[in-house]
Structure formats: structure tokens, C-alpha cells
Amino acid sequence: MERLVHDAVRAGETPGAVVVIGHDQKIVYRLVYGRRACVPVPEALTWGTRFDMASLTKPTMTALAVMQLVEQGRLGVDDRVSRYFPEFSSHGKGEISVRLLMTHYSGLPPDLPLDDPWTGKAEGIRRAMESGLINPPGEKFVYSDINYIVLGLLVEKLSGLPLDRYAQSHILEPLGMTESCYRPAEELRPITAPTQYDEHGEMLRGVVHDPTARRMGGVAGHAGLFSDAHDMSIYAQALLDRLKDRSSRFPLRRETLLLMITPQQPAGKTELRGLGWDIDTHYSSPRGDVFSRNSFGHTGFTGTSLWIDPDSDSYVLILTNRVHPSGGHSVVRLRHDVATAAGRALGLSVEAQAGSKGV
């Protein structure tokens, strides 16, 4: 494991990495190696470094918030989005359901256009509502930030709370994730990993890296959470404990959680997505070669990933800062190789994976 991380750092794929392997209700391995920052001065990476979680925000916060509302009977996964936002029905989007947004089969494009200097949450909302389609709804898996921008807006509309306040009250506080937040306070910036230079030449630090979320004020359904290895390990373990019917603070019932982590995409489609989590798509490299096909996870553009395997009662958390200081690096191979090494160290094999029977 150390060799894999050291090699990735030496190759310039990331300045550093925090790796956590959880198994059988405890952390069995953790590694902190490399730098939190390279510029303007080098800083050593620490266990308590807070990272921009990027798209890990989608399943851990936004999708969970949606499913809490589903559990309360305030929303249905097969409800049309236009029921709550009539303006969303433009350009043939009237048939798009909450389920299609959550599984990325809505037909919406990957992101809002950024080729003009728009700014403000209201403008982001308008563009999301008025977006056209690139595929008929339900036809094709296309990973889209717009899907989760709209889901975040649904949470706000039905709860009456801004998304970050909802997450704080209904997810972070119940889980005891005291080191996680949106829009970190100024005093937290020294322990937050800087990402990269923005369009004005300023280094982003404690400011969300995703340009759409940044233009919308730093809080959106698709990105905005900042967290660290300690808190993300709390999240992963609580989720596993709920799946295993153990005592857990995870703020969702097991039967609802199962909808999030089992295939929910349209019938006959081969890119498998739960209601929030990736199960088996071309983004599933963090599974590695030996974790079961019942495992699930997600990645974040900045270099974060979490993969959870209920069959082996394990998880692999990798926090890197691959975009620092100037972007352009990849940790796809590192994610895959670390997960494979972790699974093999836990005694898993390809043969065992093929015979896995579910949670």
C-alpha cells in the first residue's frame, strides 16, 4: 500500500494521499503521506487535513437528504420533477422523475454551460430549470451535475432549509461529523488542502473547486462538502453498521438505504446505479479487482473516493488532491490498485467476488 501511494506521489499524480481501510467495525489501516500543499510554500499532509470532497457530496449528502424525504413520505422516487418545479418541464423534460435524476438517466447534459461569465444561485437555478436534453429521458447513462443541482433544490423546497443547513441538522450532526461543513470558515483554511488556481490566478483554499458550485455561492447538490478522513470514516462505518443491522447513528432506515445501494436504473440498462451510489459503471475503478459486485461507492473530481463492500464488511477511503496546484493529474489507477491491494490483504479473491451473495 505504501509503495502504491509513494509511487503515485513520485510520479506527480498527486501531492499526497490519506488512505483508510475499515474492516469488521474498525480502522485496520491508515496512511498519511506527502503534502497538503506545494505552493506557495510546501505543507505536510496530516490526518486532520480537510479536503474538498467534490462529487462525494452527491451520494453522502444530497442523495441521503432526498431519501430522508422519501422515507418521510414527502417525496416519491418516481414523482415527476415538474410536479415540484413546473418550469422544469420545458424542452421535453416533463417526464423526468426523481429516480432518473438520482441514477443519471435523465437525459440532461453533464453540466451547466460555463462559457459566459454568469454568476449567482438564482441564475444557476434558472439555467438548470431551462436546460435542454441531450438524450431522451431513460435512454442512456450520462453523469450529470445538473441532476444533483436539481435534487438539491428539491431538498430545499420540501424542507424549507438551505441545503447546507439541512445537511448540518439532519446528516452531519446526527452522525457526529463535527469536522465537516460547506463553506469552511476562514480560520479553517490553514488545515484545508488548497486545490488549484482559479480563472483569476488565485489559489482556491476553503473555497469549492467546482466552478458551477462556486458560481452558485459554494453550496449545491452536486458539490460543496468539505471533510476529512476522520469524519468520512465515521460516515462509512455508520452506513455499514446500518446495512448489517448493528447499532448505528446513520440517519436512514435499512430498507431505504438498500434502495440507494442496489441497482435502480431503467430496466435493461447495463450501467448500474443506485439512488445516489455508483455500483457498476465505467466510473467504478475504485472497486479494484476483488471487492464484490454488491459493493458500491463514488468518486470526486478533486481526487476523493469512497468504496464500501458490505459482503466483506469493509470500506476503502482515499483522499487525494490531484488538482493541486494546476490540475491535469489522474488518480484512477491509484484508486484501483489501492482497492485491489486492500481487498487482497483482507483475504478476498476474484473467485470469492464471483460467489458473493449480497448484503
Image (spheres, rainbow, N blue to C red):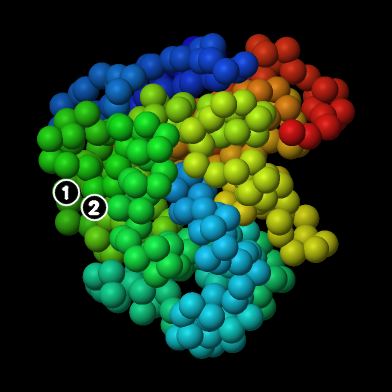
Q: What residue does disc 1 label?
A: 202
Q: Is residue 340 visible?
A: no
Label 2–label 1 contact, CB within 8 A: yes
Q: Is residue 304 visible?
A: yes
Where in the figure is residue 242, as x and y percent of width and height?
60, 33
Write the residue at 67% across / 50% down: 259
Write the residue at 17% across / 30% down: 190
Numbered badge on residue 142: none
Q: Nearer the viewer, residue 189 or 3?
A: 189
Left or right of 120 in this view: 321: right
The number of numbered badges drawn on the structure is 2
Quadrant of res 31: top left
Distance between mark 2 and mark 1 Cα atoms: 5 Å
**Above or below 251: residue 270:** below
* Amino acid type shown at disc 1: Glu
For the C terminus, the image quarter is top right
Density class for disc 1 (Cα within 10 Å; few <14, some 14-19, many ≥20) is few
Q: Secondary structure at mark 1?
A: loop
Q: Nearer the viewer, residue 41 or 313?
A: 313
Where in the figure is residue 197, as x and y percent of width and height?
23, 47
Q: Nearer the viewer, residue 155 or 210?
A: 155
Write the residue at 39% across / 63% down: 159
Where in the figure is residue 74, as x and y percent of width and height?
53, 65
* Amino acid type shown at disc 2: Asp
Where in the figure is residue 22, as x and y percent of width and height?
55, 20
Quadrant of res 104: bottom right
Q: Secondary structure at mark 2?
A: loop
Q: What residue does disc 2 label?
A: 198
